[in-house]
Image (spheres, rainbow, N blue to C red):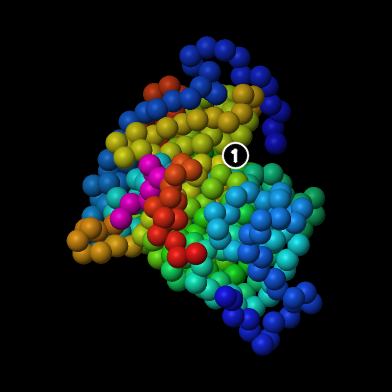
């Protein structure tokens, strides 16, 4: 992990808790939450509120909690780093490779994974979605971000709650549409929303 | 009370301990079980378990667990490596396998589940570990579609309704 520092005080502290209305989730709700059964892949930890949000519709929710398995992954000194990343990813995933999802929630994770691991994860996401599927990314945009991924949930009112769990900060990737498309190749940015208070959300689809 | 398969491989005899007025030291350490049968911390069972009373697992089970009309509680130190069919399931410990809850499945903050959950009501307390899928199906026609995950019911009272109907 990169060097970490104390966050410092102030209302704009990267480690401050925030609740922000999500325009992307309005789009997600309008496009995906209908009468048909929705299939969602959540790469984050299990969160009660998020489960409740998707429980409003007939839904299959697949939770992978990848941070616990992949956050500390680093490429080996020797050998094929991409192949090693794919092996680690295959070990971490529990859902079937044949499963296809309408929506993938990649909250905060792209800011914390090693770029090689994020590339491998993106390839896996591409293989797990269809042309109409959406990938939702949320992350901080500042130079400093919390040292560990925050707990992010979506409430029934389509408000995203961002709650950092670490008071320390580290340098962030400064997510922007260009940076994200470079880090997650093969996905095309459909929408990008500045949520304010240093958070941004993105909706991506297959290129 | 419980059926045991002939092909069980456990070296120890499976013992289901009913609560006793003078509990063993292991049972004394266990939380209140509310009249349910208890598989104690030192017990390992391999095979198929079937029964008509509530069950608390403080030890280890490997195989299948079927309690169609009852509640299965996996205690904090309990480890279940099995496919489970029960009326309701509460997990405080470790489960590897699919959980089918006729009415409800609750994974507590201390719970760690790797497997799939199929139930009309699912509660995952924040802080629990869970890897797998959750199928939130329509419950009944009269209740409409998509019975929701139980946000309100994530507290200690969440299982009381289920426990109240217990036959055990």
Q: Mark 1 points at which residue?
A: A112
Q: Residue at x 63, y 59 (%)?
A: B19
Q: What element carries label 1?
A: loop
Near mark 1 (Cα within 10 A), the count class, few <14, some 14-19 or many ≥20, is many
Whether residue A176 is in magenta: the answer is no
Picture quarter with the C terminus of chain A: bottom left
Examine the rendered structure and indicate whether residue B140 appears above or below residue B122.
Answer: below
Left or right, A109 with reference to A154? right
Q: Residue at x 42, y 32 (%)?
A: A161
- Which residue is outermost to the front? B21
Q: Main secondary structure of the magenta part?
A: loop
Left or right, A178 with reference to B141? right
Viewer-side residue, B142 vs B160? B160
**Image x and y of residue A59, in percent:** 34, 58
- Which residue is outermost to the left? B142
Q: Quadrant of residue A133?
A: bottom left
- Span shown in magenta: B147-154
Q: Residue at x 54, y 30 (%)?
A: A164
Whether residue B153 is in magenta: the answer is yes
**Image x and y of residue B141, in percent:** 21, 64
Viewer-side residue, A87 vs B133? B133
Chain at numbered mark 1: A
Viewer-side residue, A200 vs B110? B110
Picture quarter with the N terminus of chain A: top right
**Image x and y of residue A8, in percent:** 61, 14
Q: In which quarter of the image is residue B65?
A: bottom right
Q: Residue at x 29, y 50 (%)?
A: A56
Examine the rendered structure and indicate whether residue A76 appears above or below residue B116.
Answer: above
Viewer-side residue, A48 vs A34? A48
Q: In which quarter of the image is residue B2?
A: bottom right
**Image x and y of residue B41, in percent:** 72, 59
- Which residue is outermost to the bottom? B6
């Amino acid at each position: 992990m990169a060097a970490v520092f104390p966050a410092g005080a102030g209302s704009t502290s990267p480690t401050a808790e925030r609740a922000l209305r999500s325009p992307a989730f309005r789009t997600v709700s309008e496009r995906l939450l209908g009468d048909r059964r929705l299939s969602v892949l959540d790469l984050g930890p299990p969160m009660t509120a998020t489960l409740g949000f998707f429980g409003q519709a007939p839904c299959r929710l697949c939770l992978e909690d990848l941070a616990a398995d992949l956050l500390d992954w680093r490429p080996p000194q020797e050998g094929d780093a991409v192949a090693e990343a794919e092996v680690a990813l295959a070990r971490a995933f529990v859902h079937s490779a044949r499963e296809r999802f309408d929506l993938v929630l990649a909250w905060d994770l792209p800011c914390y994974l090693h770029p090689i691991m994020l590339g491998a994860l993106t390839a896996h996401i591409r293989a797990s979605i269809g042309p109409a599927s959406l990938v939702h990314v949320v992350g901080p945009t500042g130079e400093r971000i919390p040292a560990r991924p925050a707990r992010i949930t979506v409430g029934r009112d389509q408000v995203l709650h961002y709650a950092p769990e670490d008071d320390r900060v580290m340098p962030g990737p400064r997510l922007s549409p260009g940076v994200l498309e470079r880090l997650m190749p093969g996905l095309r940015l459909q929408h990008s929303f500045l949520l304010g208070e240093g958070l941004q959300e993105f909706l991506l689809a297959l290129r | 009370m419980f059926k045991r398969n002939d092909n069980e491989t456990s070296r120890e005899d499976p013992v289901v301990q009913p609560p006793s007025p003078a509990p063993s030291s292991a049972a004394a350490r266990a939380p209140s079980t509310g009249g349910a049968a208890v598989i104690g911390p030192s017990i390992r069972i391999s095979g198929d378990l079937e029964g008509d009373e509530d069950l608390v697992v403080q030890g280890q089970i490997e195989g299948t667990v079927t309690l169609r009309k009852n509640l299965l509680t996996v205690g904090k130190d309990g480890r279940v490596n099995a496919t489970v069919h029960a009326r309701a399931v509460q997990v405080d410990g470790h489960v590897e396998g699919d959980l089918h809850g006729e009415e409800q499945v609750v994974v507590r903050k201390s719970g760690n589940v790797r497997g799939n959950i199929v139930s009309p009501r699912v509660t995952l307390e924040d802080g629990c570990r869970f890897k797998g899928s959750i199928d939130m199906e329509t419950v009944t026609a009269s209740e409409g579609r998509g019975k929701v995950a139980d946000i309100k019911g994530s507290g200690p009272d969440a299982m009381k309704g289920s426990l109240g109907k217990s036959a055990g």
